[in-house]
Structure formats: C-alpha cells, structure tokens
Image (cartoon, rainbow, N blue to C red):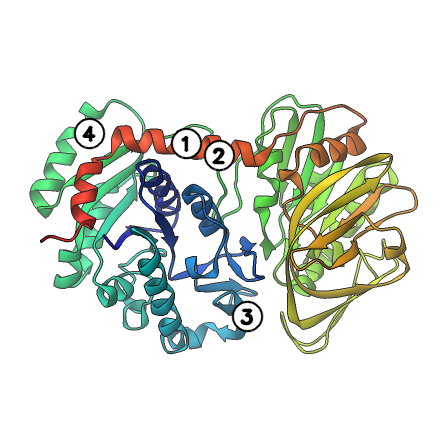
Amino acid sequence: MAGLMIQGTSSDAGKSILVAGLCRVFKRKGFSVAPFKPQNMALNSAVTLDGGEIGRAQALQAAACGLELHTDFNPVLLKPSSDMNSQVIINGKAVSQLAAKEFGNIKALAFQSVLEAYRRLTDQYDLVIIEGAGSPAEVNLRKNDIANMGFAEEVDCPVILVSDIDRGGVFAHLTGTLNILSKTEQQRIKGFVINKFRGHLKLLQGGLDWLEENTRKPVIGVLPFIQDLKLDAEDAVPRLTSTSQGLVNIKVIVLPRISNHTDFEPLLANPKINFEFVREAEQLVGADLVIIPGSKNVRDDLDFILSNGWKDAIEKHCRYGGKLLGICGGFQMLGERVDDLDGIESTAGTTNGLGLFSMTTELKQQKDLKRVSGEYDFAGEKGRLTGYEIHCGQTTGKSLKQPFCHLQDQHGNRYADGAISDDQQIIGTYLHGLFENKFLTESVLFWASGKQIIGYDWQEVRENELERLADVLEEHLDLTKILQIVKPSN
C-alpha cells in the first residue's frame, strides 16, 4: 500500500476531518499510517519537536496516527500576511514572501521538497493519507498545482472526492467538479463521500443512485452531521458562540490576520463559559476577560485596533476592572511600539502600541519556533503549563521584569516569558496552547471572574473525539472498498 488522497469540492468540505478520522481508523486496524498535505494555506499552525512549523490540521492528523509532529507531514505552508502576500514555509522554515501575482512560482519553488517528503513517508509507513487543498477544479491554478491533481498525477495515487451536503447542491458540486477535470484526473477519482448529512438515508437514496449511474463511480459512504465535534479547526474563525448561561464572559477580538485561534477551542467548548469572537468594539461591553489573540501581521492589525475604536473600548474595559490577556502578537500590541524595520510582515516602519506595558517589540527575520513547558505564577495562582511559540518579534522593556511564567524549551534553554501589570489586571505572553492546560485554564478563569470553574484536559478531549470520529467512519464508510482502492493490484 502507498497513498490515498482526499480531495474536496470546496474549502471546508470535510477533507481535514475525514483524513484525521481515516488515520485513526487504520491505526486501530494495525496499520502504520501517516498524514500528508502537500501544500496548506492557513494561519493556524503547530511546532514540531525539531523546531519546524506545519499546519494545525496536520498536527491533529498526526495525533490521530499516534505520531510526533514532523515537517514531512506538511512540507509547504503558506501563511497570508495580507490579501496580496504570503509567507512561504518549506520543510518547516520560512524561506520567502510570495506576492499573489507570483503564486504560480510555487511549483518551481517547492514541488521537489513536496515529492521528497512524500517519498520519505511512503518508505516508512504502510499507508499515507493525503489531504488536498481547496478544490481540484480551480482551472486558473491547474498549470502550477502541487496541492491536488498536480500532486496526485505526479505520484500516481487514487483520489476520493468529498463534498458537504449541509451547504446544499452536493450532487452539482460532485458532478461539476468531476466534469471540469481532465480525463486522466477523472479516472483517478475512485469514489465519493458525502459529508454532514442530516436525516434518514432513504430520503437521499434516489440521488445516490443517480450519482453512481451518471458518473460510474461508487458512493463510498454518507457521513452524518456529527454534533459538537471538538477538534481543531483548520483555518476559518468559528461564527458560532457559546450560548450557555456561563459563569464568566470571555470575548476575543477577531483581528483581520488573526492566527492560531484554535487556542480558544477549549474555552468555546466549556459550558461554564460565555465565549464570543467579537468583530465590533462595542461588543466588548460585559466582558470579564478580553483577549487580543495572535496575528500574522501585527502592525497592520494594530492599525486596525487603533483606527476602529478598539483602543478606547479596551481602556474602558480595564478602567472598570475587567481583565485583559494578550497572546503572541496580541502581547506585542500591549507595549509602546512595534518596529518592523525590515518589512518582515508588511511595509517597513513603526506603529505605536496600546501603551499598557512599558516595552517595545522589534520584528526579526529569524522566527522563534519552540515547544515549551514550565511554571506560571500570577495573582496568587501557581502551577505547571505547556505550550508553543511562533513569532518573529523580540520584546524588551521593564514590564518584563514581572513575567507571566518561567519556561524551558525543547533544547533545554530556560527563560522568562510575558508580563503582568502591577495591578494584576493585564497579562501578556508569547505562548499558544495555554487553554489546553486544565489547571492553567482554571487559574485564568478564577483570575478573570473570582469563580471556581472546571477546565478541560484538552489532550484527553481530543483523544476521545478522535475515537468518536473513527467510530462514525467505521459505521458509515465502506472500508473494504477503501482498502481495495489503496492496495495495489497484483
């Protein structure tokens, strides 16, 4: 066996979750299995043990396989810093900025690295389950495609096409995608999976029969809509907010270039928390805790805050006793100034910060990519934590003399991180993944509300949800057919 590729009729069709579920299914059946995504475009990322960077979805898929994170799982990661530019990460390291008009150059720049990473995985594992990107029917991208059929054709792997019926038009999506592909690409698609079906399957059967008759390809399964699946989102910020009558109100500012919003999924899932992603400054009213999240373009997102009424709303929130937490880029914004003298994230220049901490940040070419563990100590709360860092900035100033935590990275280096205001109302830290720590989450919630609220062991939650997902796939997919597709004929 070698590789099986999951492509989708659109972004968010279910590719990432289907790959994660299949990884867990085949791991349970005794196969050595690994995930692979040739090219990802996302602002949610994770840090590998050797200090590389991959998409957050591939980190979830690696967990489904029971594997430590590796850059081979996602050799090319594009992180948009604006509508017109993306940072290009190859084999875990940033190598260049790519303008949108130069996107066609990605094949020459990165395809060899993609193929080498894939071959290393197929040498090591029984099965590699590959996730496509967006849709294979983007005719304007076909010439330089390395993420969908361009990859599948090069390595000669079979493809399953998935589509989301919850959006409507699933049969048009599947047949329309198929019709746009070339003859050889059409032959490469071995079957369909329909995702997020609600209702009785008999109501869909006529459509399934029509699809198989008209395409001469099998429907391998119809997956039900899985309620409240608590697994990492690939990129899109959730529009849903918690609707419970919780004990604490937490609001996260949606920055134009928000990154690693997966930090907040343990909060969004907790029924004791009223959680909301907010897009207007007026929505901060009533918050116990306001969070400024990470950003892929700190100065431009800081301009967004300064020019849209957020600064006044944040200051009013603090003036009335509310708590404020800045994470990574959000931490940098709390200082007096952010300098990007080399134009690393946007045009070269300097932007004044919110002035809530006595510190300045200078963006550097070298990105800090760390996996860390350590101890936190704030507002009478102490305990252990783990997390990860992804940032270009180096921050200095007297506010750092009262740090949020003390850490050790994967190389054994020890250092202090973050800052706490003298009045204990404001915390800043470079750490992502804070709320995956149960006891730290409980400490933050007590600091924000004065109430004892139980947090989640998010690793345990993720593991349970992967098992639940795999159970659903085993029940609703024709796994025998899938094995026939990926096992070479004699």
Q: Residue 204 carries which label?
A: 4
Q: Which-is-in-front pick, marks 3 and 2?
A: 2
Q: In which quarter of the view is residue 204 placed?
A: top left
Near mark 1 (Cα within 10 A), the count class, few <14, some 14-19 or many ≥20, is: some
Mark before the other along the chain sequence, 3 or 4:
3
User: How far from the left and from the top, in percent, is residue 268?
Assistant: 59, 34
Mark 3 packing: few (<14 Cα in 10 Å), some, or many (20+)?
A: some
Query: Closest to the observer: 398 or 261?
Result: 398
Give the labeled residue for mark 2: 463
Is residue 287 among what the camera can see? no
Q: Nearer the viewer, residue 22 or 174?
A: 22
Task: Kindly identify the amino acid type of the residue bearing the numbered disc 2.
Answer: Glu
Disc 1 residue type (three-letter): Glu
Residue at 33%, 67% in the rendered image: 146
Disc nearer the start of the sequence (1/3)? 3
Q: Which mark is residue 444?
A: none
Q: Position of residue 334 (x, y in %)?
A: 79, 55
Mark 4 vs mark 2, foreground winner is 2
Horizontal arrangement in the rendering, residue 74 relative to residue 361 (left or right): left
Spot occupied by residue 347 in the image (x, y as percentages of width and height): 65, 75
Q: Name the residue under label 3.
A: 94
